Image (cartoon, coloured by chain):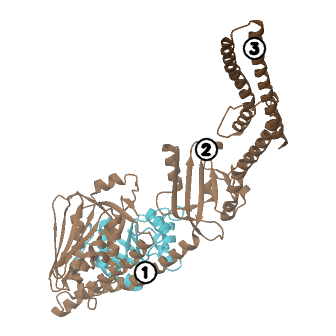
Amino acid sequence: MEHLAHLSRQIKASLIIGLLVSNGLLIGAYWLSATMFGLDAWVILALLILLTIVLSLVVAAILGRLFMQPAKALWQVILHVSPSEHGVAAPNIESLKIGRELVANLASQVYGLANVVAESNKKSEPTEQDYGFAATNLPLPLFVLDAAETIQFANTAAAVYVGQPIAELQGKNIYMVLDMAFPSESTLDTWLKNVKTNNATASESWERVRLNVIDNHPTRLFDLAAYYNKDNPNHQETMLVLFDHTKQYSQDDQAISFIALSVHELRTPLTLLRGYIEAFEEELTGQLSPQMNDFMQKMSATAQQLTAFVNNILNVARVDDDQLELRLQEEDWSQIIDSAVANLSLRAKVRGISLQSQVAPDLPKVGVDRLSIHEVINNLVDNAIKYSGSSTSILIDAHLSKEGLVETTVQDKGVGIGADIMPNLFTKFYRDHRNRAQIGGTGLGLYLSKAIVTAHGGNIWVRSKPNEGSTFGFTVKPYSQLAEELKNGDNKDIVRGAHGWIKNHSLYRR
Amino acid sequence: MDNQPGQTIQPDNPQAVKKVLCIEDEHFIGELYDRALSNAGYKMTLAVDGAEGLKLAQTDEFDIILLDLMVPTITGIEILRALRDPAQTPHLKAKIIITTNLEQREDVRADIEKQADGYVVKAELTPHELVGVLLKLA
């Protein structure tokens, strides 16, 4: 406040001096013109008016400039510390004619405030030390690798995860530390090779990676995220972060293991039953009464149906656990239809139903997993058999769709499906309606069929009217189209057959 | 499978009787396979124990080995590895077909795919249909 009063006094003094000087000049001019030169009164008046105007302008300019000095200096001070202005010099406060003390005081306050702001900004901008602290204490295992995939940095969580001190990890090849098993052909190794050739930066993630540990450490299962940047400083090209899901994935695996074990236990007696039935059929051909022959066929068909059901259980578990893996290979669709019809005809026959198939000539080769697509046809035909009612024929038709896909329909003339039921048909455990009391089924077949067809890149649909029958249809892609889409899938090991595989060539899809 | 029960199957060259080693601990399955293979002109030897099966396989007298994975003493996977390891089995002419009802873990399956010549789920095939697979192998 004292500085403000001082400034006020300086302004007043400047004004008084200014007024005194200008008035003195006017009086002097009057005296000179009246007494020395004896000018006429009108001329004196005109001269004085002119002089007043000139003096007013001069005094106003001088005082205005003087009074603006403190404001201008303060403005310069503020701009000088402003982060948005660059190159504004600090004012020379010492050269101020008035308000020097006030401006000096206020400038010191502004500089002080600016320092506080700068300090606080400085704290919010992390330093390298901050980054190091964060990386070291990140509660997820983190590895940073150089171009040779040698560990440059491993954090505390990484050391704990692999059970080795940080100092021992640094300098080791990552694959010596992490012996990883990936669920598909896409591995960290293959990905890195690819991105190092083709990319400047890239990122990727994998689920259900298994860490094969040495000694007595329990197996660990985790998701892995990787980031690659060719231009990272200090040759730190690749970052790996592990997200442990051992508990969750182990539980899933146990569930699958239980189902797999149950399936094994069911399959062994089924193998025997089918073997014995076949032996009886072979030995007793022509010796049985027509009824016993019919019973034998029904027994065989039932064993086949049970085998198919056991596969459904296993595959539904795989679908639910995202473990259904297809091997898509080039196949002749008419052969697949013929083979499926041959396998299913006994089941249809014992129900008094004939299976008819028609396959359009010149269909392109398709890209399918033979085993899985057989299950789709099995399920659709089984369904048609179940819901045929008094109808005695089922038609399987394969043709090229308008979209250039191979479309197959399974048509029955049975009980049909109400419109209200349709939306739920492909839902798990959804059992129709159409005669629940008399017709068995688990509601797994259509759910599984949809999953398999979708995994093939196709579509499944149904068209039906109550009491007129149903038509289920699905599409698969021509192999040429699929091979183009999957040209990176270059596995050339295996061909999977309807009941197994022999070595050859295939594509993968999950 | 293309062949139907009751149909007589003969190997391509009936003069050379093909020898099959079946490593399978379930006697009933062994019995059924023996019947079907004999009817088709093969000569089958059954080993119900892993160690015995490996020993027989390493004699290199067989053309085809049917290998179950869940067998006692030495598992089918271990037998497969031993048969594909030149240090343990210097020469093996036989084709190895895994015959199992067990569903494999991904890593085990990958291991099998590298080393075996074929893989069948026993419940999916009748003995007669298995013979059809063996005929295609040749």
Indicate which label's residue lies in the foreground, 1 or 3: 3
Residue corresponding to mark 2 = A232
Q: Which of marks 3 and 2 is nearer the N terminus?
A: 3
Q: Mark 3 lies on which chain?
A: A
Q: Chain B is drawn in which colour?
A: cyan
Which quadrant, please, contains the N terminus of chain A? top right
In terms of depth relative to the viewer, which is nearer, A174 or A458? A458
Q: Distance between the residues labelled 1 and 3?
A: 127 Å
In terms of depth relative to the viewer, which is nearer, A209 or A492? A209
Q: Distance between the residues labelled 1 and 2?
A: 52 Å
Q: Which chain carries label 1?
A: A
Task: Tally the marks.
Answer: 3
Q: Residue A29 carries which label?
A: 3
Q: What element carries label 2?
A: loop
Q: What element carries label 1?
A: helix
Residue corresponding to mark 1 = A264
Asked if residue A53 shows in the view, the reply is: yes
Q: Is residue A436 above or below residue A332?
A: below
> What is the quadrant of residue A298 in the picture?
bottom left
